[in-house]
């Protein structure tokens, strides 16, 4: 009898007016309406597939990689009834036209708005009182069409045009706070400049050494309160020591290149940073420079240990491409305008998965990265299958299974992080090695 009452209570909980699927739970309808209104994409005519529904479609496409556009539209029940009150399926051509009318601007607006809201709700890794984030770039291949040639080719021998994306990501939750992307012919520094001001106050952002730029780092540091950065030094870096705090800790000045002074007139002839050398370097990273100048506040040991958390952003990229995009390297859209729309949808859907993982981690009292990304992704995808069209009698059982399955998503605790960088693989030779043939001896 008690078990029956428990199941009855669960059923009554489910019947309350609330949304269970991950999209509507994390993205209120007001945010969707604001995105289409602020970008001038709201539907004026009464349509079966208005702009607001097209936004949900793009998010669904970003999450359900193996489903066609029409399947996603049908699964999310996005089409409105016709004038007769009936719900005939929409033609694929009508769905594509509605998606094209939407454009990329509402999806960009929605990503920026949601990322800013969600970032405030999530915890951060911290070092010396600074929130830890990371910046890095990655590439997405596109369909080889005349329109997508706008993005350019990564190499002269590449078969597909590529998009270069640079994102700002939390090292603790892998939530993407901001992103910028476009033609691969532009540099990573070009897109990183568009992220200036996106990091929260009192933060430390970890950069790969490919982002080494006086203009970028001075802009990053000067935009707000305690917007700090840290990056590895280059082997041929020129500098002069102003003050030494210890054998491996110095305040230095570096010359500003003529190209940097030409593009940023406010830069002088030199700029300052703190140089931290690794006492026993292993690998090709010998040390770091950072804007954390005060050795009493930002200790040498803390800054020596923190850089290796930059690899978290690469793990985030790997999970996005391998699992969310089902290891399919080529994006769907045939036009470059659609590529921008598609990528904003993919990144927003990726953040939704991360939010669900953070909630599961909170419920089971573990770190967010102890939750399996692929299983959390499958769980969200399954919501579309059982949250609609199911008979009420199966709901308590499904809810119970959902709660129990949450325990299975917890991964074993990570091993202690190594204190040296990953080894770099040897580059393949451009030309095959040639060996002298030994002449056969005759008997």
Image (cartoon, rainbow, N blue to C red):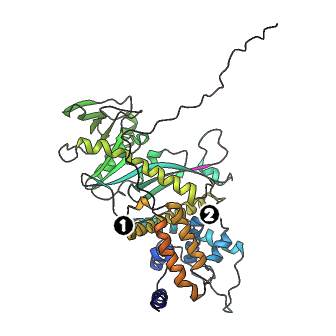
Judging by the rendered image, the residue that carries numbered circle 2 is 65
Image coordinates for residue 248, horizontal then vertical, percent: 25, 33
Residue 433 is inside the magenta segment? no
Q: Residue 68 appears at what percent x and percent y?
A: 67, 68
* Sequence-first tag of 2 and 1: 2
Magenta span: helix, strand or loop, mainly?
Answer: loop
Q: Position of residue 410 (x, y in %)?
A: 45, 63
| Depicted 274 relative to depicted 373: above or below | above
391 over 218 or under it: above or below: below
Relative depth, front residue between 431 and 200: 431
Please state which of residues 398 and 50 is positioned toward the viewer in this rendering.
Answer: 398
136 vs 412, nearest the viewer: 412
Of badges 2 and 1, nearer the viewer stands 1
Q: Label 2 vs label 1: CA separation?
A: 31 Å
- What residue appears at the point 58 percent right and 68 percent down from the top-left corner? 58
**What is the span of residues highlighted in magenta in the rendered image?**
156-163
- Residue matched to label 1: 365
The crowding category of the residue bearing disc 1, from other C-alpha atoms within 10 Å (few below 14, some 14 to 19, many at least 20), is few
Q: Where does the C terminus fall, quadrant-wise?
A: top right
């Amino acid at each position: 009898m008690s078990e029956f009452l428990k199941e009855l209570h669960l059923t009554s909980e489910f019947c309350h007016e609330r949304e269970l699927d991950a999209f509507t739970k994390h993205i209120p309808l007001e945010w969707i309406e604001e995105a289409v209104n602020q970008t001038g994409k709201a539907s004026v005519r009464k349509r079966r597939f208005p702009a607001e529904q097209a936004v949900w479609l793009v998010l669904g496409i970003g999450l359900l990689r193996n489903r066609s556009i029409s399947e996603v539209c049908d699964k999310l029940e996005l089409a409105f009834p016709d004038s007769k009150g009936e719900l005939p399926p929409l033609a694929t051509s009508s769905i594509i036209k509605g998606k094209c009318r939407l454009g990329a601007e509402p999806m960009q607006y929605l990503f920026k708005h949601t990322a800013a809201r969600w970032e405030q709700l999530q915890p951060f890794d911290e070092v010396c009182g600074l929130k830890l984030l990371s910046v890095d770039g990655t590439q997405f291949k596109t369909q080889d069409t005349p329109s997508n040639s706008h993005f350019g080719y990564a190499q002269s021998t590449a078969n597909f045009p590529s998009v270069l994306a640079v994102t700002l990501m939390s090292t603790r939750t892998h939530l993407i706070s901001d992103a910028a992307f476009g033609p691969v012919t532009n540099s990573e520094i070009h897109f990183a400049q568009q992220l200036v001001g996106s990091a929260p106050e009192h933060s430390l952002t970890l950069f790969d050494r490919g982002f080494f730029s006086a203009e970028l780092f001075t802009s990053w540091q000067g935009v707000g309160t305690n917007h700090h950065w840290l990056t590895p030094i280059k082997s041929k870096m020129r500098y002069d020591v102003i003050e030494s705090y210890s054998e491996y800790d110095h305040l230095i000045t570096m010359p500003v290149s003529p190209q940097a002074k030409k593009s940023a007139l406010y830069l002088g002839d030199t700029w300052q940073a703190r140089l931290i050398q690794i006492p026993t370097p292993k690998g090709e990273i010998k040390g770091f420079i950072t804007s954390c100048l005060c050795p009493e506040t930002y200790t040498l040991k803390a800054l020596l240990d923190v850089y290796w958390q930059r690899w978290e952003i690469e793990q985030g990229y790997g999970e996005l491409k391998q699992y969310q995009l089902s290891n399919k390297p080529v994006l769907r859209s045939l036009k470059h305008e659609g590529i921008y729309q598609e990528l904003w949808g993919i990144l927003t859907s990726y953040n939704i998965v991360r939010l669900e993982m953070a909630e599961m981690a909170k419920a089971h009292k573990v770190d967010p990265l102890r939750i399996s990304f692929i299983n959390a992704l499958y769980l969200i995808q399954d919501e579309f299958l059982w949250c609609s069209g199911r008979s009420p009698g199966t709901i308590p059982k499904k809810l119970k299974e959902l709660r129990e399955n949450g325990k299975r998503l917890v991964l074993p605790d990570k091993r202690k992080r190594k204190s040296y960088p990953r080894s770099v693989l040897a580059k393949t030779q451009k030309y095959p090695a040639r060996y002298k043939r030994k002449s056969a001896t005759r008997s």
